[in-house]
Image (cartoon, coloured by chain):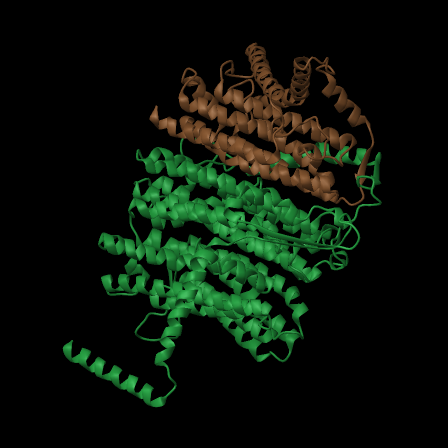
Chain colours: A green, B brown
Amino acid sequence: MIAELFLSGIVVWLAGAAASLALWRQPAAARRVACGAALAGSLLDLAASSAALFSASPVFIGLPFGNPAFTWAVRLDPLSAFFSVTLAALAAAVSLYSFGYLKGMEGRRNLGAFGFFFNLLLLSVALVFTASNAFFFLVAWEVMALAAYCLVSFEHEKKKARDAGVLFLIMSHAGTGLLLIAFLVLASACGSLDFSSFHLLASRLTPLQQGTVFLLFLFGFGVKAGVVPLHIWIPEAHPVSPSNVSALMSGIVLKTGIYGMARVFFDFYGAPPLWMGTVVLALGVASALLGVLYALMEHDLKRLLAWHSIENIGIILIGFGAALMFRALGQANLAALALIAGLYHTFNHAMFKGLLFMGAGSVVEATHTRNMEKMGGLIRRMPVTALCFLVGAVAISGLPPLNGFVSEWLTYQALLAGFGTTQSLTRLMFPIAGSLLALTAALAAACFVKAFAIPFLALPRSPEAADAREASFTMRAGMAILAVGCVALGLGATWFVPVFDPITQQTLGVRASSALVVAHGWALSPGTAHGGTISLAGMALFFLVAGAAFALPLALRWRRRTVIGPAWDCGLPGLTADNEYTATAFSKPLRMIFSVLYRPRREIQAEYEVSPYYPSAIRFESEIEHPFEKRLYNPLRDRIMAAANRMKGIQAGSINLYLAYIFITLILLLLFGVRG
Amino acid sequence: MERLTENAAQLFLLLVLSPLVTGVIRTLKARLQTRRGPGILQPYRDLQKLFSKGMVIPETASWIFTATPWVVFFSTILAGLMIPMVAAEAPLGLFGGVLAVIYLLGLGRFFLALSGMDSGSSFGGLGSSREMTISALAEPAMMLAIFTVAIGAGSTGLTEIAGAAIGQNWRFLAPSQMFAFAALSLVLIAETGRIPVDNPDTHLELTMIHEAMILEYSGPYLALLEWAASIKQLVLMTLLINCFWPFGLQPTWFGFGAVEGIGWLLGKLLLLSCAIVLLETMNAKMRLFRVPELLAVAFTLGSLALISTFLF
């Protein structure tokens, strides 16, 4: 049954891709077919993978095509099924949203091609999560990269979109190269490409090989996940893609890197050496902190969200890193807690980041700009979008009673418990990671005060913002589904935690939920005795009761003596948008405090006509430095270009010369063959 | 049923005691500055006056503006019910421990900062920006101090933390506890918006933080926000004193012990208030960009606390 559902999902996506390509001359039909197929495929996949998550044994499905040398089979074990559920839940909401979102592109862009790549992307991500051998995995991985590339560069008349696509493609391929080597090392050790034969294999390699394979996987998957310092493509690629694609890219395509790491760290490795966990933990902390610090400086709404993806990947990796360390220290229960924290955050991030990107898409469509400084007051023009965005903002800031708080709380608990697991100085890493996570979360809250208040509150800052129109019904529905998801995953945390039991059982051999869920399903605990509890359902109940019993009646009573009046404008003639605090001004204190990191540069030019008190024009320019681009990638690129320039000499363009090269190569190969 | 009574009792205490603490601090400060001061009951009179007044809501504001006072008030109350005040057991300890308290206060702050920006007046934006900056910088120090305490107790539940502190015969003089106490005290000053970080009595544009965010509020909503600010101050002070000086905490809310417990609580609060008053009177308000240095000191103290947990 699961197999049929899964296969029909695949078939629907394939058919959707083909049909929308065939319908490219009828944009309206292409849009409906593409989004309908994406939605139907997602729902089928959702049904299949959630059933597979709870099935007693992994589900194997041989695909009815392919090559006798490799088994083109998918395997839905708990880990795969969990990521598949994440994909399907997000994709369903995004597909619904796309019905309305793509409508604005009708007639202007080739929706047939869009539908093709969109369905192809969903299909390939689903196969990445479920492929049962390395070869199939890499094929799906590459199809995913190509589909994502085409979608990122979809608005290809813009140079930025093309550049971002190329950057993504280059980095993605560099990462795939590392993965290829790593898989080949594993395959040569066991003589098979099947993931099932890789199980615990990596731990049987020599220590040097173990370390190398680990780093290859970490960086290979890290490129896709956007781990610092491999993150530079994310803030370029997310903002330029259409917003439904950004939602998918950030929500689930980055998670393929996380899936890969989970698969390798917890399936291929048994008990890894301690240093591996510390490396992952340190990278996680660095990504989380740098991600949020750069997000704070953005006033491009979508770029800001892109930086937050890096931050959240960091938080996920803090959980994974702690889990690896606990495994090395032989603490299976704590490892389960940390792994659950990481995976929970993975799912949460898919929900709220998908929601936020869709909200940003609605706003960008309504105001025709990504620049927050030109928005404002949208809460009145777009009330539903504003509410959904607010839910996402509260969730991503990790505030109770929404889902972000649950996963961050679990992460804190894992880090806290980690301190007692070892006597070495390594244990200091746990509380330091915890305090930096606290800094990250607080900065994220500051950033989302800005990201919500500047576009949505106060007065419109441009005529476009003043005339903004609310998003269409399907777009609102898509956002509302994820907003409800964010609330449900927060309040229903105790019902959601048992979902991880099969995964921890499979990877760590423990089932944690019975220890984590206490007080008859009302509260969550870290699983240690007297470890402290939280009950988000309880908190929500408190707010609900207090709100209904006091806030509502009193607010109604006070309304009778309320006057609507102008805000204080210092006696000037009326408040205008020019008086408002800007996004740049909002983050100015942090820009000054962290100026060592940002190295801000600003330039002010004023022109005067009569006296210096009355400037006729002021030009203000401000920018911050991005150290990884400047110090790592740009020199690297320059080296490569210089080397390519030097090698240009051997390409003289003469056919005789090329024939000579071929001849020399043949001779060398022959010699090599004879000697071998 | 017992639990409900405990909650009601603590709720009553939070609501009634919090303006008193504010009043005592103001009066003590006035006396130290050789002024007479308005009297310790003035905050009650202020609240009463504000609640009976009408209010003006800016025409530029949205529903966020009217929702915020409630969110701030209720989240602060909820946080207050999660800490042990009189009995060693926190009435709503099941709903969350010290992390939940911090994040609930964070929820209130998030909405307060939003409402500051909601009216479109630049003062609000100024206040929100500064508030979010300072609270973000205070967070790592606070978390280190809390980790130190929580590691000692093996729990983030405040009932367990207070219990552990009682059980160890008052280990306050242990270096780790002293450092954590010092770090948390500095954070408390920043979080409650007191001198030298913020001045709760000022309405000078250049210096105000919390007052700037609530500048557009009037009448009952202003009363709610002022009350919530008092409760938040009481909650954080109680958190500090009951984590580090847990003596006098009673096994239960019921019986004569409760009176004794309330007496202890009042005594400890008075002591801490005196310390705050001394600090406020002896220091001038810092420039905004000196505050990170103060919080860096707190962070260093927090790190020292943590390191000394296994050195000593």
Tell me where residue B36 appears, x and y as whole percent: 73, 12
Image x and y of residue A120, in percent: 50, 70
Q: Is residue A242 visible?
A: yes
Which sits in the foreground, A400 or A564? A564
Q: Which residue is located at x 45 percent, y 41 percent? A: A411
Q: Is residue A634 left or right of residue B133?
A: left
Q: Is residue B85 above or below residue A300?
A: above
Q: Position of residue B155 (x, y in %)?
A: 44, 30
Q: Is residue A576 above or below residue A12?
A: above
Quarter of the image where the N terminus of chain A is located: bottom left
Left or right placement of residue A28 versus residue A676 in this view: right
- Looking at the picture, tell me which residue is in the foreground, A270 or A306: A306
| The C terminus of chain A: image quadrant | bottom left
Residue A195, placed above or below residue B59: below
Q: Going by the picture, which residue comes out furthest to the front?
A: A610
Look at 57% across and 41% down and name the residue there.
A399
Q: Kindly give the residue lying farthest to the left in the view shown.
A: A675
* Image quarter of residue A29: bottom right
Q: Quadrant of residue B269?
A: top right
